[in-house]
Amino acid sequence: MSIDPIPPLDDPPPAEECLCRQVLIAEDDPMFRRILQSWLKGWGYKVTVAEDGAQAWESLQQEPSPELLILDWVMPEVNGLELCRRVREVQRSPYQYIMLVTGKDAKQDIVTGLEAGADDYITKPFDRDELQARLRVGNRILTLQRGLIAAREEVAYQATHDLLTGIWNRRAVLDFLHRECERASRGHGSLAVLMLDVDHFKRINDTYGHLTGDDVLREVANRIVANVRSFDLVGRYGGEEFLIVLPGCDEAQVSQSADRIRMAIASAPIVIENTNIPVTASIGATVAPLVPIATQTEILLAADQALYQAKRNGRNRVSVLLTQNTIVTR
């Protein structure tokens, strides 16, 4: 058997290999294991080593899981072929690229390995340059996968988030409100909804310009998010209006929660390019259910009525529509 000599570990890795990918080596032969580990580290990979298939399978249950798997076909406990099948049955995302290492080179053996879930194979004794080239193929596929995942996440983000403020958009916050209404109805729990409107926002746009107005909306969103709980949801309802959904918030808590948000906005001017811009907000609040079973439409209507009352009473205040359909303004 002829094997290339082990290169020094301080050899600079080729630029295309410097991806810091996590690689799992499952190999029961100590000599092959050391050789593979040495080469891969020299190429810039982060290496995890397993001495048999059972140890490899246990390692694959940890997070983060390796992206590249180099599995010996013949191993005790669990062989490489069975490991391939297990990995593919789990259908883990993101995809894991599997290279099967084997002394078998018959065509039927190769077909069997590929059908078990391997992406590539390399036969023993293998050449160092061939292994590196085959790993580059795997890297190209995994790099493409990373790009597809990033694009998918970006599309999902844009579909659910307001691009100006970065908070949830109207559709997403209404979907969340719908789910919380159903949850509160099933569990007989409480649910508060706040509708917030930035006071005299048109005047801000007319005085300072629309770009500054955008900055003001971003900062208002930041102040709202900073003053709600981690499981509350803040969304831009439209224009200068925001919707805040507060699961588990009852009549005794809603006024306090709404007023904390109002004060966070009004307590200090928003500074845009060394200009202090005083900003206040009016908030209409309600607690569901207004009747034994309140619909999303009824809840939004109640919050909107309370907001109208807050604005009519002078703005920069909170109005709460209680379950008895009475308005309390603060």
Image (cartoon, helix red, strand yellow):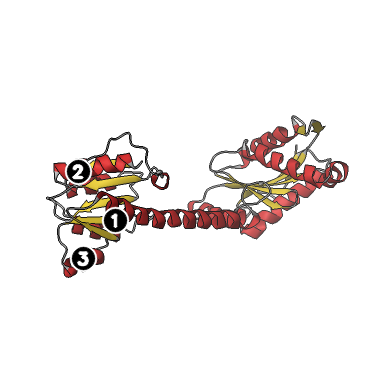
Between disc 3 and disc 2, whose residue precedes?
A: 2
- The residue that disc 1 covers is 98
Q: Quadrant of residue 14?
A: top left
Q: CA distance from mark 3 to mark 1?
A: 14 Å
Q: Quadrant of residue 38?
A: top left
Q: CA distance from mark 3 to mark 2?
A: 22 Å
Q: Nearer the viewer, residue 158 or 19?
A: 19
Mark 1 belongs to which amino acid?
Ile
Between disc 3 and disc 1, whose residue precedes?
A: 1
Asked whether the viewer can see residue 83, the reply is no
Pointer 3 local density, CA inside 10 Å: few below 14, some 14–19, many at least 20: some
- The residue that disc 2 covers is 33
Between disc 1 and disc 2, whose residue precedes?
A: 2
Mark 1 near mark 2, Cβ–Cβ under 8 Å? no
SS for callout 2: helix
Quadrant containing the C terminus in the rendered view: top right
Pointer 1 local density, CA inside 10 Å: few below 14, some 14–19, many at least 20: many
- The residue that disc 3 covers is 110
